[in-house]
Structures are given as structure tokens and as C-alpha cells.
Image (cartoon, rainbow, N blue to C red):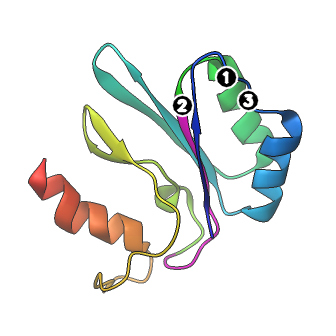
């Protein structure tokens, strides 16, 4: 199952926590934060070093961090979380979204759910 972490502003995740999260969920990572009333999403990080290079400049911010283990869809940058719903909202989750049709095997259940249900509601 994926790892989704809420990290409060000013709280630091330990190197051990980040490395352990990556090692147990090595199919890509990403994170998001709010800035100027918009959600900023950094995703598609496919190596631990790439993740740390992107994460470290933002590590003091309030963040939602996600480490993926693939259950549906390909192992590719596009299937990493967070997924943008609109300019002010993104989503990460932990687990499988059941009963969501996934006609294109390239895309994850979360991608299909976001495209089919969340974006049209926003």
C-alpha cells in the first residue's frame, strides 16, 4: 500500500523516514503545497535522489507527500501522486479505489478516478 504523509509546516521528516518510505514504495514519489492560493504539485520523481533534490528546498513547508507502490497502471511519472484536480486542489491517497473502470491499463485507478469524477466536480 502507498504511503501518504501530511507534514506540518516546520516539522521535519527524518532521513530514515523518507528513505524507508521510498524503499517500501519505490514506484515514484511526489508532494504538494499551497502557495498564493494555488496548489503547487511536484511529482514524477522516479529515484530517491531525484525525490530528495526536489523535496529538500521545500522540507520546512506544510506538505502532502506521497510514495507510490503500483497496484494499477504503469510505473511511470504520470501515475505518481499528487494529482491535480484544479489550480487550488490536488489529491493523494493510500490504497486502491475499487469499482472505478480502468479501460486504459497505462493509467492508475487514481488517474481514472481523478479524470472521471473529481475534475468534473471541481
Q: Nearer the viewer, residue 107 or 85?
A: 85
Decide: few, some or many residues near mark 2? Use Cα within 10 Å; few <14, some 14-19, many ≥20.
many
Give the magenta part as a residue range: 63-73
2 drawn magenta: no
Residue displayed at 21% across by 57% down: 118
Measured Cα–Cα span from mark 1 to mark 2: 8 Å
**Circle 3 sits in a helix, a strand or a loop, which is it?**
helix
Decide: few, some or many residues near mark 3? Use Cα within 10 Å; few <14, some 14-19, many ≥20.
few
Q: Is residue 58 left or right of residue 47?
A: left
Q: Is residue 14 left or right of residue 56?
A: right
- Quadrant for residue 59, please give it: top right
Instruction: Name above or below for residue 55 compared with residue 111.
Output: above
- Quadrant for residue 110, please give it: bottom left
Residue 89: % across, % down: 29, 38
Answer whether labels 3 and 2 touch (C-beta < 8 Å): no
Residue 74: % across, % down: 54, 74
Q: Which mark is residue 27?
A: none
Residue 13: % across, % down: 75, 32
Q: Earlier in the sequence, mark 3 or mark 2?
A: 3
Residue displayed at 60% across by 73% down: 70
Q: Earlier in the sequence, mark 1 or mark 3?
A: 3
Residue displayed at 78% across by 42% down: 18
- In the rendered image, which quarter contains the N terminus? bottom right
Answer whether labels 1 and 2 touch (C-beta < 8 Å): yes
The residue pinned by badge 2 equals 63
72 drawn magenta: yes
The residue pinned by badge 1 equals 59
Q: Which mark is residue 53?
A: 3
Measured Cα–Cα span from mark 3 to mark 2: 15 Å
Instruction: Name above or below for residue 79 compared with residue 22.
Output: below
**Circle 2 sits in a helix, a strand or a loop, which is it?**
strand
Instruction: Name above or below for residue 37 compared with residue 2.
Output: above
Amino acid at each position: 500500500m502507498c504511503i501518504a504523509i501530511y507534514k506540518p509546516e516546520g516539522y521535519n521528516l527524518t532521513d530514515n523516514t523518507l528513505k524507508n518510505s521510498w524503499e517500501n514504495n519505490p514506484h515514484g514519489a511526489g508532494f504538494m503545497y499551497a502557495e498564493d492560493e494555488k496548489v503547487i504539485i511536484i511529482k514524477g520523481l522516479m529515484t530517491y535522489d531525484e525525490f530528495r533534490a526536489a523535496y529538500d528546498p521545500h522540507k520546512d513547508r506544510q506538505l502532502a507527500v506521497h510514495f507510490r507502490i503500483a497496484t494499477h497502471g504503469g510505473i511511470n511519472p504520470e501515475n505518481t501522486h499528487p494529482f491535480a484536480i484544479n489550480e487550488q486542489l490536488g489529491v493523494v491517497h493510500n490504497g486502491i479505489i475499487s469499482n472505478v473502470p480502468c479501460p486504459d491499463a497505462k493509467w492508475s485507478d487514481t488517474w481514472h478516478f481523478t479524470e472521471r469524477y473529481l475534475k468534473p466536480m471541481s
